[in-house]
Image (cartoon, helix red, strand yellow):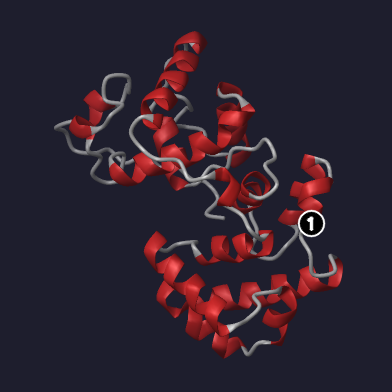
Amino acid sequence: MAPHNTGDISKRAKEALKVLRNVFPIPDFANICDDPFKVLIRTIISQSTTEINARKAFEKIAMKIQPLTPSRLVEAETKDIEDALRVAGLYKNKARIIKRLSSVILKEFNGSLDFIYTLPLNEARERLLKLPGVGPKTADILLLFCARRPVLPVDTHVNRVSKRLGLISRDEKKYDAIRSRLESLYDPEEYFAVHMLFIALGRAFCRALKPSCPKCPLKEICPSAAEYRGSHLRQSQSHYPSH
């Protein structure tokens, strides 16, 4: 259920960002990426798990395998990687993916992801998408967080929040369509803030099963607030890439 008035949607998008800036802190962009390969590994570990468990798993693998580079991961025993990732769930599958993508990066890109800084945006994204375990969301996270390219990654929280706010049609399932639409509503320099703040809102208030609409800082401008407040939640079947 999204309003058809483009002007209203654009105004609501900007107002939502303004309000959220005053509610949640935004991480320092300058310190968010020290190494694109580590960000890639961290992102893969974070799939289908909680932020806390993903952080624990990354810390364990970073301690067990030093330095955390493609060459060291290729050489490492699969069991050592699995043991480090166990807390994050799906550890066997994640260990297999990490081993495979490390091998590809080592062989095809000389062990470096520095092409994300220099290649044209679409070409850099296509290269990332060819890596094992890398989907559009993961590719866009690397491009935005590390290379500061003008892309707006869409994860489960961004997807849910943007649809409940009426910025995106609830019927839209395609990742690229959702991303492109959101990007059209904001300036490129706002993409990082939008991504981080929508995630923060999704975790704190706009939860999937039990949204806390009465306490939500956007309740006055969100068209879904009345629908969810005091009523049984109707889950929307929103599909988007998990990676």
What residue do we see at 22% from left, 38% from top? Answer: 212
Residue 15 found in image quarter = top left
**Percent position of residue 181, x then y:** 58, 27
| Number of numbered discs on residues | 1
Residue position for label 1: 114
**Residue at the image point whose x is 33% and y is 33% from the top:** 23
Q: Can residue 90 be seen in this view?
A: no
Q: Indicate the position of residue 228 as horizontal and vertical percent values.
A: 23, 32
- Amino acid type indicated by mark 1: Asp
Relative depth, front residue between 86 and 115: 115
User: Compared to 222, does 202 lie above or below?
Assistant: below
Q: Please identify the quadrant where the C terminus is shown.
A: bottom right
Foreground pick, 59 / 57: 59
Residue at 64%, 49% (x, y): give it. Answer: 136
* Outermost residue to the left: 230
Left or right of 52? Residue 107 is right
Q: As displayed, is residue 173 above or below residue 2?
A: below
Image spot of residue 163 (x, y percent): 42, 31
Q: As drawn, is 55 to the left or to the right of 133?
A: left
Task: Measuring from the top left, give residue 123's x and y in whole percent.
Answer: 82, 45
The N terminus lies in quadrant: top left
Depicted 14 relative to depicted 110: above or below: above
Q: What element carries label 1?
A: loop
Graded by Cα atoms within 10 Å as few (under 14), some (14 to 19) or many (20 or more), the crowding at tag 1 reads some
